[in-house]
Structures are given as C-alpha cells and as structure tokens.
Image (tube, grey):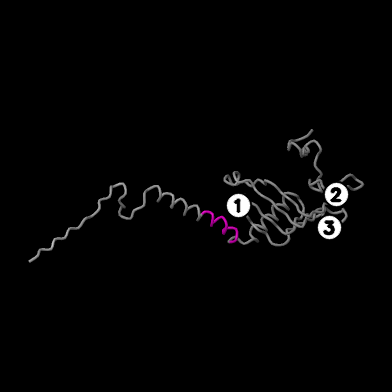
Amino acid sequence: GQAAFAMTLTSVTPMSQAKTSGALPAMKRLAIIVAVIAALLIGAVLILPNLVPSAVYKNRIETAASSALGRDVTLLGHARLAVFPRISVRLDGMEVANPDGFTGDNMIEAGALRASVNLLPLLFQRVEIGEVILEDATIRLERLENGTANWDFASQDDPADPDTSTPPIDPETGSETS
C-alpha cells in the first residue's frame, strides 16, 4: 500500500499584529467613556429646560422684578428657559406699570424680553443679571409739573434724597458719572 502523508502549514504572525482577546486598548476605552458622558451632559442640557414648568421661573422673575422696580411688572406669554450657551429666559411680552398720576397704565411695553444671568454668582447662590434686551419696546418717559419723573424708580411716597441716590451710569464705560 501506499501511505498518505499530509502536512499542515500554519502561518505565524508577530505578537504586534495578534489580536488580543477582544479587549479594546485602554485609550480607546477611555475615549468611548468620555464621549458617552459628554453625550449625556449635552442631552441633559437640551432636555432640562423642558422639564421645568415655565410658570415656576416666570412667577419668580415677575415677583423679583416688581420688588426691584417698586412697580407692577407683568410678564406675558410663554417663558422659554435656555441653559446653553448661557442661562437665559425669553418671554413673549412684558409690561412695567406707570406710577399713579402719570399718563397711561404702562411706562414700558415690550413685545419680547430676553434676559440672561451670570453663571459664576449662581454657584454662590446670588443672581446677577448679565443682560436684559427688550424687543419691539415702547417706553413712555414723562415728567410731571412738580418735577417727578416716571423713570425715577425710588419710592413714590418717599422720593430719594439727591445726596444718597445712585449716581448715573455712563453707558459707554459702564462706570458711575459724577
């Protein structure tokens, strides 16, 4: 008889090309983890404003503005909160009441209001307004014969003493003028 002889050749690959047991290199794993965390944070930033009812912050803003100005402030329409690129709110309208004795019910009427707050003070539980923008606004400035002006936000019952009132701010430099 004939004898059959078979030989099997296998190729040998260097260790640098050999696949590991399905594990990803550490750097690639870290990059995937960072990408997943970033995606979750971005998703939270985009979804979070929709989870907070607008009435919650709309009422707080209205109360704080009325208290700060000493006038009735009415926020109209729907409030939309944004947290990116900065914390801000947009309202479909706003009115600031005129003091008694002045013409018309409102000193300011705006078609829309946008306001933002500075982030760093929030970390210390302080709210600092970064900017306020009134769109399509009508502002009625009026001075009565006795010299009282509707843009003077000091108490109407107790006018501010000129020596203790806040000095005017120069809009160009943002500093006090004398």
Q: Nearer the viewer, mark 1 or mark 3?
A: 1
Whichever of callouts 1 and 3 sits on the residue coming sooner in the sequence is: 1
Q: Identify the residue under disc 3.
A: 105
| Quarter of the image where the N terminus is located | bottom left
Work out which residue is located at the far bottom of the displayed protein and give it.
Answer: 1
125 inside magenta stretch: no
Q: Which residues are magenta?
A: 41-50
Q: Mark 1 belongs to which amino acid?
A: Phe
Whether pointer 2 and pointer 3 mark residues with C-beta atoms closer than 8 Å, the reply is no
Q: Identify the residue under disc 1.
A: 84
Q: What numbered label is drawn on residue 141?
A: 2
Q: Nearer the viewer, residue 130 or 30?
A: 30
Q: Nearer the viewer, residue 65 or 28?
A: 28
| Quarter of the image where the C terminus is located | top right
Whichever of callouts 2 and 1 sits on the residue coming sooner in the sequence is: 1
Work out which residue is located at the far right of the displayed protein and give it.
Answer: 145
